[in-house]
Amino acid sequence: MKRISLALFLLALLLGSKATCLAAGKVVIVSLDRTSLSRAAADPELGPWLERGAVGLMNTGTAARPTAEHIYTTLGAGSRALGTEYTRLVFNRDEEFAGYPAALLYRRHQGREPDGKVIMLVPAAAGRINGALRYPVLPGLLGGTLHSFGRLTAVLGNSDGQGYYREAAAMLADQAGQVALGNVSKSVLQKDALFPYGVRLDPEAMLPEFAALLPQADVILVNWGDTARLDEYRPFLSAATEDALRGEILAAAACFLESALTLMDREDVLLLLSPVPPAGESGGGLLGWAVLIGPDVPPGSFLTSGTTRRTGVVALTDVAPTVLDRLGLPWPGAMIGRPFAATGAGGVEHLLVIQTKVDRLFRLRPPLLKTYVFFQIVIVLGAVLNLFARFARPVYFEAPLYGLLLFPVLVLYLPLHAVSLAGAFVITAAALVVAVALLLLVSGDATARFAVAGIVTALSLVVDLLRDAPLIKVSVLGYDVVSGARYYGLGNEYMGVLVGSALLGTASLLQLYPRHRCRLLSLAAFFLAALVLLLVAPQGGANFGGTVTAAVAFLVALSVSAQLRPGWQSGTAVTAIILVLTAIGLFLNTRVPAGAQSHLGRMLSMLGSEGWQALVDVVSRKAAMNARLFRYSQWSKAFLVFLATLAVLFYRPRGVLARVRAGFPMLSAGFLGIIAGSITAFLFNDSGVVAAATTLLYAAVPVILLCGQAAEAKNN
């Protein structure tokens, strides 16, 4: 019995995950491309279907743009992938293309006879283009996994218009570009001169085809291509004609769904998808949607997943693991998504509110953050130049500099997601003026102000993380659901803010109360160690790069504050601390179920299944991301300005920084930790320049303020 259990465990580890349910039935997927959630919900025929199961918004991120060829390749790979111009060239094996039977062309390209009834003519193109990506992507992994377990797949329907548009088959095609069963030919269409491109799906052909496939296939994808044809033809239509056609199409789709559900067994699962957004959309309009209907899915509930951990939000990459999980099969480690789960209760109206908030944040984030970074650069450079040129008293720069420190905590609390773009700028500016005025009233002592700004910011983030980050989720420095870079935990912007503000606050307290330094140093060490564990915890920050950043920053600051001398004893102590924190972090992440693992947990699983190559892929991807961000991100400019400022102040004005170090030894220790953390953040995070800039903010600005005070005291 023990041997059997061990064998099962090793098999699950090899595959990178584990099955979470027993095989319960078939999976039927109906795709309604280019249909927004608001239009689907407003339709009297299709709208009720959104309430018959669990519904959720869906991030449509791929390795390129959210277009059909990339989206369906991503659905089939379970990882952000690239399609090609040939992805749409899918045919029944007995169809003709360019004067040749599709089966013959497949043999020409692949050197073998096809086995499936539906074949992609150029499957090798996707393999080549995805092989150049800096992370593992295997087009056809979903179909290949299903076939390896003896499960049959089928695809039915197409989106043909002015040419062949059959990209949907890429979702279920295996690595060889084959789907076992189905019909994607024009035989499922009927001519209609009043319909876009003069053709439409033939319901009298679709339903019998589906009924014939259902007993044979385990997974069936029905591509209701009329929605895509309508959206593609939309520029030629009047608004009234478009609405009438859409109502007719969605009514036919709802009728098909009702008939299909009648044919399905109670154990079968119906997955209604709209993965491709309508043409011309941006922001929140790029989010697709999904509805999962099954025997264990409460009607009126919301979808979530281990990828997003957000009620009502899932990702495109979650679909492949969901299909496998519903069939009781393990999903490979190369699939970065996690299965859908149902949670909560509500209505589509709630999702539309979420979509509106996401859209506002998406549109507010670039202009507000670019303005903030612009003022960072202008104010910091102006204050430093003033130390040399002395065109104004340094005290005049204090209020703007304090405003830079307070901005991150203010946009955490301000409900900017609920107002317009202009309103957000006005509210932020007014709040900054009030906050800076209050901070200046705290004390004439800069150290006390640093303590207030640092402790309030750090504790605000800690409390929010412990409450599942309700404020971070709707902050412009928080997550971006549209891009899908992060959905939970602590993103790189606020990770840098937390590390920098925590060190600034604790160092300021040590500087303010020298008589209680030993006791405060012990409390600071405990607090900072707890922050490291919070950052690594899968239900906390879930940020491995942030954990390394914090550990390095905090150890440097504490070592300098405690005046540890370099040697084997101090080295052993620091090494032991790092090992203990690492062990605790690994333990926390390995105790989490596969469906809810953080990025670190997934990395550990991939190391078990793929070896060190998984680590090499991750490092390569992070390096590529950093290089790209350093060239194009506004944060790179702020980071370079902060570094240049500290470098200049190290030498000029002569003696100023030396007086600061002598007068503020505990603060100086904190600054050294922040600088070390900033460099570590740049090296160990895939958006490292962002974290490096937000971390370094809490050293550069206080150093300028203290140098300004020192210069003014010297002049007086």
Image (cartoon, helix red, strand yellow):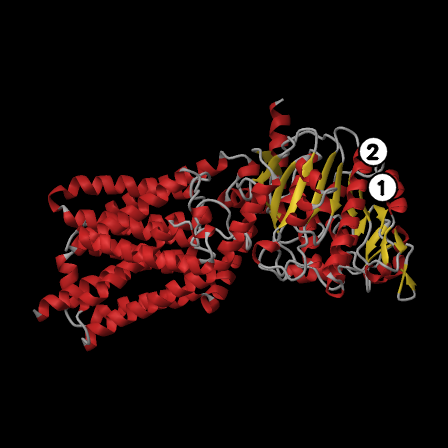
The reply to whether residue 583 is visible in this rendering is no
Query: As shown in the figure, which amino acid type bears the numbered disc 1?
Result: Phe
The image quadrant where one finds the N terminus is top right
Query: As shown in the figure, which amino acid type bears the numbered disc 2?
Result: Leu
Badge 2 element:
helix
Q: Which residue is mark 2?
A: 263
Residue drawn at point x = 23 percent, y = 53 percent: 439
Q: Are marks 1 and 2 in contact (CB under 8 Å)?
A: yes
Name above or below for residue 330 compared with residue 359. above
The reply to whether residue 287 is visible in this rendering is yes
Q: Nearer the viewer, residue 393 or 597?
A: 393
The image quadrant where one finds the C terminus is bottom left
Residue 666 horizontal/vertical position (percent)? 18, 52
Q: Report the Cα–Cα distance between label 1 and label 2.
A: 9 Å
Q: Nearer the viewer, residue 657 or 489?
A: 489
Q: Nearer the viewer, residue 685 or 432?
A: 432
Residue 153 horizontal/vertical position (percent)? 79, 43
Q: Which residue is mark 1?
A: 210
Badge 1 element:
helix
